Amino acid sequence: MAVRIIKKSWWVDFRFAYTRYRKRSPENSKAGAQAYEATLRQRLTRGEPIDQTGNNSQQVQTFEEFARSWFEEYVVSNNKFSEQKTKQTILRSSLVPFFGKMSVEGITAHHIEQYKAHELKRGVSRKTVNNHLTVLRKCITTAYEWLELPGAPPKIAWLKCPPPKTDHLSSDECGLLLSHADGVVREMILVALRTGMRLGELKGLQWSSIDWHNRMLTVRHSQCDYTKELVTPKSNRERHIPLDSDVYEALFKRKKDTGYAFAGADGGPFNSFRLSCRLEHVRNKAGLRKIGWHTLRHTFASQLVMRGVPLTAVQALMGHSTITTTMRYAHLAPSTLRAAIDMLNPKTALNADFGQPVGNQWIDQQKGVLAQKNQP
């Protein structure tokens, strides 16, 4: 490949049919220049001019113009309504104001670095900037595919972010919170603490999703505040959660065949704002710090990990698409780390039972359950 760098810019420089072609690569990288040269050679082989394509009217689109069509033709078709609103806000408030007047193929890695610096200077968090970059990458990648742009999309380097912090309640705080709640709100708090369901999943829970015979709850719906309709859970994945005795008894007392398991006076689902206010009222009565419904989900995962439940089991119950998300709770199992360190001390190494006492207890319990099932 005849590519070279001249004054910090990558160029293609080659001969074809006794004619020399020297052009600046739209993507300022070696790989981008090599891809651009391959595209130019293909055009020349087909007898096409290298300065334009049959799709040239689309090639000169600005980022703002393409982003509009990308949203209408891709985002609306492939994303949930809540995700559409999020992407629309990111485009309107951040990406279009910065990249809007640039041509799509004119956006380089340097422009993206300038955008990152601009957003950080405005006080935008690193995590938020990365969320914006995710939308930007998908939009630009789609542009290169749809418009058949030469070269390759610019590379995007994500910002390094501190690990996310999660708040959770202790066992005593859970009991205190439940003792100051009553009615359907108490049931929702109990189910959130014992199943780890998201607020939208709690609101959208249907009686038909509960298997009373096997004491199993299937998370297959989430209630959307925007459309007021039932949608699929996050990541479009169903998951199955066993019901403990407290949850089973609380729900069984008023079970129905169809409809919302948690409904207001009109039989419809609760509003998220209303539920947040109800939870705030309960936690004020209990004298607890400020928490939200998602804190109860974190509590569910944290309590499992602290009791030695394997992270893979926690991942399945939480519905995480990757174990990386579940690993944020790994530090809550300190006995494993303690056992590892004890192996280095001669005084404790001989007596160290390398493993997690609580985890072993959990495993023993599973063995006992299996033994009971295998009994004739």
Image (tube, helix red, strand yellow):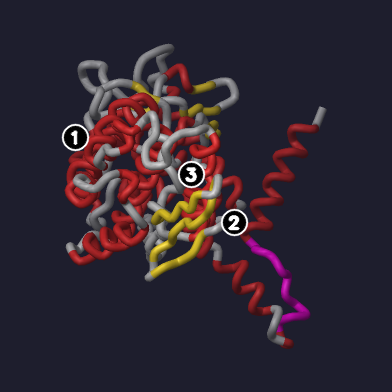
The residue at 60%/74% (across/down) is 338
Label 2 Cα crowd, 10 Å radius (few <14 / some 14-19 / many 20+): many
| Span highlighted in magenta in the image | 348-357
Give me the disc on residue 202.
none
Left or right: 326, with 179 as reference point: right
Q: Position of residue 65 (x, y in %)?
A: 23, 35
Does 352 lie within the magenta span?
A: yes
Which comes before the other along the chain, label 2 or label 3? 3
Query: Which residue is nearer to you in this view: 164 or 366?
Result: 164
Farthest right residue in view? 376
Q: Which residue is mark 1?
A: 274
The residue at 50%/39% (across/down) is 44
Label 1 Cα crowd, 10 Å radius (few <14 / some 14-19 / many 20+): few
Rendered view: 162 above or below 248? below
Which comes before the other along the chain, label 1 or label 2? 1
Q: Nearer the viewer, mark 1 or mark 3?
A: 3
The residue at 48%/44% (across/down) is 40
Instruction: Indicate the quadrant containing the C terminus: top left, top right, bottom left or bottom right.
Output: top right
Disc 3 element: helix
Q: Position of residue 125 (x, y in %)?
A: 27, 60
Left or right: 275, with 54 as reference point: left
Q: CA distance from mark 1 to mark 2?
A: 35 Å
Asked which quadrant contains residue 206, the reply is: top left
Q: Which residue is mark 3?
A: 40
Amino acid type of the residue that numbered disc 2 sits on in the rendered structure: Gly
Q: CA distance from mark 1 to mark 3?
A: 60 Å
Q: CA distance from mark 2 to mark 3?
A: 60 Å
**Number of marks in the rendered image:** 3
Q: Which residue is mark 2?
A: 308
Instruction: Indicate the quadrant containing the N terminus: top left, top right, bottom left or bottom right.
Output: bottom right
Q: Position of residue 55 (x, y in %)?
A: 36, 30
